[in-house]
Image: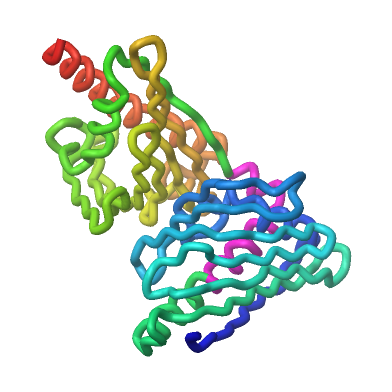
Amino acid sequence: MGTTHETEHRVEVDAPAARVYALIADVANWPVVFPPTVHVEHVERADGGRGTERIRIWATANGAVKAWTSRRELDPAARRVRFRQEVSQSPVAAMGGEWIVEERGEHACLVRLTHDFQAVDDDPGGVAWISAAVDRNSTSELAALRAAAEGGAGAARLTTTFDDVVRVDGAARDVYDFINEADQWSHRLPHVAAVRLTEDTPGLQVLEMDTRTADGATHTTTSTRVCLPTDRIVYKQSKTPALMSVHTGQWRFEEVDGGTVVTSTHTVVLAPGAIAGVLGPEATVDTARDYVRAALGRNSTATMLAAKEYAEGRRATVG
């Protein structure tokens, strides 16, 4: 047995304990709430929000993208969530812990986040890497949890989700390939000025892209992408344009009636402090939401139309 190391991080939150617990329990929304989390999928769901569930998580740790499967025990009555990694990724040999929400009055609570872990072969370098990642991510997650809980309805008003859809008379595999091969986008998409893509682990990409806006300006974004052949590619921007504090998205590819329906979904949290500087002193949250909706939708639709042309051309050539 290896040496077990234990940590605990805490934060006081000026929000009802039930609201805070709900944010912890709702893993589907973690990519929006927690900066390190890129994507989460349920392998097994808890019955009625209590009991055991299994989840697959993709998240950043010390700048690297890691993926693991965890079992969680949800106890809404006690406002506790225990977790244990079933399949860890090196240098982690084993990891578990618990979220504990302690009520401190009607509108306040204390959140404790504990971890216990072992490093592969008890390697000191691995222990240091894991300790740094746990400290960095726990601090970031607790701060984000507090902001989301204390923001309440105001935070919800800053969040918007929307879809754009294109029908393709071509194979889903070809459409998927076009979106997956983002390193070719500067040659294939007029709104992409430059692109830099790394994929050290198959299916896990880091994409840095310079995008041209409608007024001719260029902005740089950095995204982590999880590619799930051949039906989905999900992503989260770690470097966003000024108007957005969070931007996550998903490309979905569904074979329908001999063709493919491609859906681009964006979820954005607006940055209210940046609105006046970007859009002018008279601009409002609604103005910013409409602007972001139009800009992202325009680029996503242009990408899907280019993918449509590519896939339909491939079908014509093969046919």
Front-most of residues 177 and 212 = 177
> Residue 153 magenta-drawn?
yes
Which residue lies at the image location 79% right of the left edge and 71% below the top edge?
Answer: 102
Which residue lies at the image location 16% right of the left edge and 31% below the top edge?
Answer: 188
Q: Position of residue 172 (x, y in %)?
A: 31, 24
> Residue 319 magenta-drawn?
no
Please give the range of residues in magenta.
Answer: 138-158
Q: Position of residue 6 (x, y in %)?
A: 58, 84
Asked where in the image residue 308 lies, by quadrant, the reply is top left
Asked where in the image residue 97 lies, by quadrant, the reply is bottom right
- Judge left or right: residue 109 versus residue 89: right
Q: Position of residue 294 (x, y in %)?
A: 42, 29
Please say whether residue 128 is visible from this viewpoint: no
How would you classify the magenta stretch by its main secondary structure?
A: helix
The number of callouts visible is: 0
Q: Position of residue 207 (x, y in %)?
A: 27, 50
Which residue lies at the image location 24% right of the left edge and 26% below the top edge?
Answer: 174
Specify how the rendered protein is coloured: rainbow
* Farthest right residue in view: 106
